Image: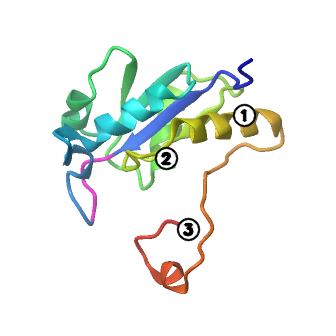
Amino acid sequence: MDTTPPFTVAIPSRYASTRLPGKPLQLIGGKPMIVHVAEAALRAGAMDVVIATDDVRIADAVRMDAVTVCMTSAEHRSGSDRLAECAVTLAWPDSRIVVNLQGDEPLMPPACLDQVAALLDQRLDCDVASLYWPITEAVEVLNPNAVK
């Protein structure tokens, strides 16, 4: 019996990355990275998958029947800001469980997305959650490219 609640996977993705402009469109096995991310999200138990982007090139790359593209402002400072705009644009109810999947995580196991949704559903006092992996090396703590 599936105990995963209905949820949305929302994927913020911008073209103008500081370290690697155009990163979402970099090819992995002949496909743009953002397509791999969307496909991973589709394999999860989500009721819908949304790409939040400010760039038509990314929108064009992920034109799939099962994926919604929400065009957002280029002025956002974070993916969370981009998803907040989507919540308003797409009129998500406050009760909607939204799992934020970063647009540069093509190898995310779909089961992890289901797990986050289930945990959010159980924790009514929790508005936001993120997957994490413990940092075990001091060098990672100092690495600006390692998300903390």
Q: Mark 1 points at which residue?
A: 118
Residue nearer the viewer, 88 or 112:
112
Which quadrant is the C terminus positioned in? bottom right
Q: Name the residue under label 3.
A: 148
Residue nearer the viewer, 1 or 140:
1
60 sits to left or right of 54: left
Residue 72 visible: no
Marks 1 and 2: CB-CB under 8 Å? no
Quadrant in the picture for residue 98 = top right
Q: Where is residue 93 in the image (x, y as percent from the top left)?
A: 65, 23
- Which of labels 3 and 1 is toward the front? 1
Q: Which of the two labelled residues, at mark 3 and mark 2, occupies the earlier sequence position?
A: 2
Identify the magenta region: 14-18
Q: Position of residue 100 (x, y in %)?
A: 53, 42
Q: Residues within 10 Å of mark 3 (few under 14, many from 20)?
A: few
Q: Mark 2 points at which residue?
A: 81
In this view, 18 is above or below 15: below
